[in-house]
Image: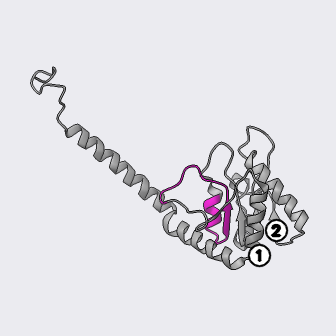
Amino acid sequence: VLCTLRNSTMKASPYGGGRHRVFTWLSELKRQWQDPRMHIRPATGTGAGGCFDRQYFALMHKAKIIVTCQPQNWEGDWRTWESLSTGAMVMVDEFRTQMNPPLQPGVHYVQYNSSNRTDLEVKLEYYLQHPNDAAVIANAGFQFAVHRHRAVHRVDNMLADALQVKQQRLNASNEPNKFRSPKRGGPST
């Protein structure tokens, strides 16, 4: 189990709120369960953004389960996609805005309530005790991320959206305006 969330108690920090709770709960569970398989550490290092170093990626790729949480006051966190790309089973709190096509909880990842410690604990314990179930979700999440949500897919989606907007504007500009006379520019008669 790996959790690399930054931990902060500052109210304005995106690392506070749910991330602080989840980081604290997992740290407590590690002590309570005395499980050497649990790695709970903030994502820090010497690379860009302070977290992209070899040790960080080595931990990510060794993990069987990665627990992450949306930043406070926004979502679409890169950690979710980075975690899915490792092939680990990913546990993440609720998405309020889904990407297209959307990830499906229970299929591509395990969703937990970041305001409910028991929910996180029960689900984590279940998947630790049922590694085959975790592996099925991990594989589905990995395949979905790699085949539907890489950067090339996002660019394709943006270009398709831009083309659709352009086509809508073109169609709107070609429609006759029923409020203007073609000759005088006044109201139609």
Q: Secondary structure at mark 2?
A: loop
110 or 88: nearer the eye? 110
Badge 1: residue crowd in 10 Å (few <14, some 14–19, many ≥20) = few
Amino acid carrying label 1: it is Gln
Q: Earlier in the sequence, mark 2 or mark 1?
A: 2
Q: Secondary structure at mark 1?
A: helix
| Residue at the (17%, 35%) spot, across then down | 176
Q: Residue furthest bottom?
A: 132
Q: Is residue 98 above or below residue 72?
A: below
| Residue at the (42%, 58%) spot, across then down | 156
Q: Which residue is mark 1?
A: 129
The label on residue 38 is 2
Badge 2: residue crowd in 10 Å (few <14, some 14–19, many ≥20) = some
The C terminus lies in quadrant: top left
| Residue at the (86%, 64%) spot, across then down | 30
Residue 1 among those drawn in magenta = no
Q: Position of residue 162 (x, y in %)?
A: 37, 48
50 or 179: nearer the eye? 179
Residue 90 among those drawn in magenta = yes
Depth check, mark 2 against mark 1: the one in front is 1
Q: Position of residue 39 (x, y in %)?
A: 81, 66
Q: Position of residue 61 (x, y in %)?
A: 69, 71
Q: Is residue 55 visible?
A: no
Using the numbered discs, state the Cα–Cα distance from disc 2 to disc 1 in whole angstroms: 14 Å
Q: Is residue 109 visible?
A: yes
Magenta segment range? 80-101
125 left or right of 133? right
- Quarter holding residue 92: bottom right
- Quarter holding residue 165: top left
Q: Coloured how?
A: one colour
Amino acid carrying label 2: it is Met
